[in-house]
Amino acid sequence: MSNIAISLCGEGRGHATRICTLVERLGPGHDIRIYTSGDALAFLQGRLADRPGIRLESIPGIMFEYVGGRLDLVRSITAGLDYQARQIGPLVDRMLRDFDGFRPDLAITDFEPALPRAAGRAGVPLVSVDHQHFLLAYDLDSLPWTLQWNAWFMSHAVWLYVMEAADTVVSAFFRPPLRRGWEHVVQVGPLLRREVVDAVPRDDGFVLSYLRRHTPFAAIDALAACGLPVKVYGLGTREPVGSVSFHEVNDSAFVADLASCRCVVAAAGNQLIGEALHLGKPLLVLPERAHAEQLMNAHFLDSMGCGGFTLLEEVDRGRVREFVDGLGRFASALAAVAGRMDGTPDVLRVIERRLEARG
């Protein structure tokens, strides 16, 4: 029996999907306490709240700031600095009080800054499992120089989140060489839900889209003119727009549609890209102009030959139609990665070794 404390960033669904997958596949024999906020808390409550041995704790979290439907990087950084100054200290103290009764054998974090500090003060070994550490550990020389500069700038925030871990695992659909000094990092693919791993791909002739809530209407208009039916998740239910239908986020329905779609047009998140590639689906991703991490994901996808990208603010009918009409050019590259993306077994081995070392 092991006690495991887990924390994760509450923004979006990528972190939540990764941790949910890990918890569901850890197996019985563990008492788990999970600290998170926002979207991630809602997602995990729907998936894990009734499972024995798991306790969910709501904590304050950092959220991206949007103005006029666009990511405001300056406001987001300011909010993050304010969070660090005002809320990290009390939250670490709260976790340390929890540790007095819970006595964790291991801490796991997915890009959340309080638990690493609490674990360090309590002498609990920490495993970092996230996507963001690629900014520190990966050789990014293949990216445009502007994105390399962004990566250097953003990497300071990653270091502040997790300053030291017993094990550092980077989960990404791409795998360039590691930088000198980061050879200890464990590189794994995206952590895939069991439903995705077990899904049988087929082509039912429609486009699947997952979009963030600030998506401009021009993107919907472009999808409506692509020549195929389109199922959109992430924007809630609303009246159809031509051939575009809108669906509430539902995990089982989304995975079924991901397995049976012809292609994917979506935000450029690491998790969804990895799931789509595992099922052999070509992607057109729509990174936001101000979202450097999504832009980096988009460039790596393009370099793999498994899809393309266009800025969310610039997407139009012609670009979407060009992608849908030219799906055949991605077939060879997709065949090389389909069915080979799941990094979950590799992460589980890291955790098991760390628990065994703890005794």
Image (spheres, helix red, strand yellow):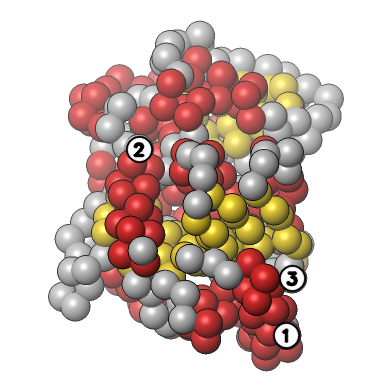
Identify the mark nearer the N-term, 1 or 2: 1
Question: Label 1: few (<14), some or many (≥20) within 10 Å?
Answer: few
CB atoms of marks 3 and 2 within 8 Å:
no
Instruction: Find disc 1 in the rendering and name its residue.
Output: 90
Could you tell me which secondary element the residue under label 3 belongs to? loop
User: Going 81% across and 30% down the picture, which residue do you hit?
Assistant: 237
Q: Amino acid at mark 3?
A: Pro
Q: Residue 139 placed where, x, y %?
A: 22, 67
According to the picture, the residue beneath numbered tag 2 turns out to be 342
User: Could you say where residue 108 lies in the image, as x and y percent from the top left?
Assistant: 48, 63
Between marks 1 and 2 in the image, the one whose residue lies nearer the viewer: 1
The spot of residue 233 in percent (x, y) is 67, 33
Number of the label disc, if any, that sits on residue 347 = none
Q: Amino acid at mark 1?
A: Pro
Q: Which mark is residue 60?
A: 3
Residue 210 placement: quadrant = top right
Q: Return the residue nearer the eye: 227 or 129.
A: 129
At x 38%, y 59%, the residue is 355
Residue 170: x, y in percent? 35, 59
Q: In front of the other: label 3 or label 1?
A: 1
User: Is there any visible trace of residue 274 in the rendered image?
Assistant: yes
What type is the residue that disc 2 sits on? Asp
How much space separates mark 3 and mark 1, taking CA atoms?
10 Å
Label 2 Cα neighbours within 10 Å, binned few <14 / some 14-19 / many ≥20 = many
Image quadrant holding the C terminus, namely bottom left
Q: Cβ–Cβ below 8 Å for labels 1 and 2?
A: no
